[in-house]
């Protein structure tokens, strides 16, 4: 990701080139501290989500000889419930990525990156990552008003 990709424009008439990733809100400002804390929390949850899901994905791959990963999502009623839940969430967050990314003025390739990340890595990784970057972008936009 480049600085150019993360430029934001949360207001319809705002200049999207006016806020860059390198702009850091003042550490003395309480709102900036809260923004960084929120973003850091999202980034921590993204790491936990990525490591937690892939720990079990790799354990599955090591224990099953040529198993049917997606088929095993529906092995019983409990796993089927969780599978339907995550599939619906994946569709919803994909729409959210597109709408919110557009509202923030992010470039489409950056926004589209979150959809395969959600499907291939984990929603538990990609969604908090998106929210952390969104929090930083909104904090920068607030500090420039």
Image: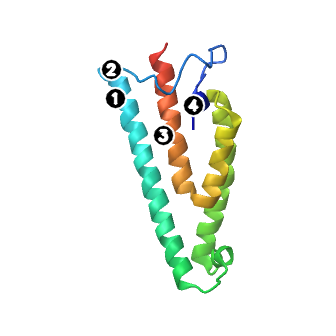
54 left or right, relative to 15: left
- Mark 1 lies on a secondary structure that is helix
Residue 51 in which image quadrant:
bottom left
Task: Tell me whether circle 3 and circle 4 mark residues in contact (CB < 8 Å).
Answer: no
Task: Tell me whether circle 4 and circle 2 mark residues in contact (CB < 8 Å).
Answer: no
Q: Which residue is mark 3?
A: 132
> From mark 3 to mark 4, how far is it between C-alphas?
12 Å
In the rendered image, the vertical position of residue 127 relative to residue 11, given as above or below: below
In the rendered image, the vertical position of residue 79 relative to residue 123, given as above or below: below
For image coordinates 66% across by 13% down, the residue present is 13
For image coordinates 62% across by 19% down, the residue present is 16
**Residue 13 visible in the displayed image:** yes
Q: Which residue is mark 1?
A: 33
> From mark 3 to mark 1, how far is it between C-alphas?
14 Å
**Crowd tier of the residue under label 1, counting other residues whose Cα lies within 10 Å: few below 14, some 14–19, many 20 or above:** some
Could you say which disc has been placed on residue 6 in the image?
A: 4
Residue depth check, mark 4 versus mark 1: number of the one nearer the observer = 4
Which badge, 3 or 1, is on the more N-terminal residue? 1
**Crowd tier of the residue under label 2, counting other residues whose Cα lies within 10 Å: few below 14, some 14–19, many 20 or above:** few
**Crowd tier of the residue under label 4, counting other residues whose Cα lies within 10 Å: few below 14, some 14–19, many 20 or above:** many
Q: Which residue is mark 2?
A: 29
């Amino acid at each position: 990701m480049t600085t150019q990709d993360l430029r934001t424009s949360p207001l319809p008439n705002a200049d999207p080139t006016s806020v860059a990733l390198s702009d850091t809100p003042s550490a003395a400002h309480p709102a900036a501290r809260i923004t960084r804390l929120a973003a850091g929390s999202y980034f921590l949850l993204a790491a936990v989500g990525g490591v937690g899901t892939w720990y079990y994905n790799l354990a599955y791959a090591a224990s099953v000889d040529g198993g049917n990963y997606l088929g095993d999502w529906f092995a019983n009623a409990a796993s089927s419930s969780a599978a339907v839940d995550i599939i619906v969430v994946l569709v919803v967050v994909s729409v959210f990525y597109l709408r919110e990314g557009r509202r923030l003025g992010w470039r489409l390739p950056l926004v589209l990156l979150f959809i395969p990340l959600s499907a291939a890595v984990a929603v538990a990784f990609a969604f908090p990552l998106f929210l952390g970057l969104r929090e930083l972008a909104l904090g920068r936009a607030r500090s420039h008003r």
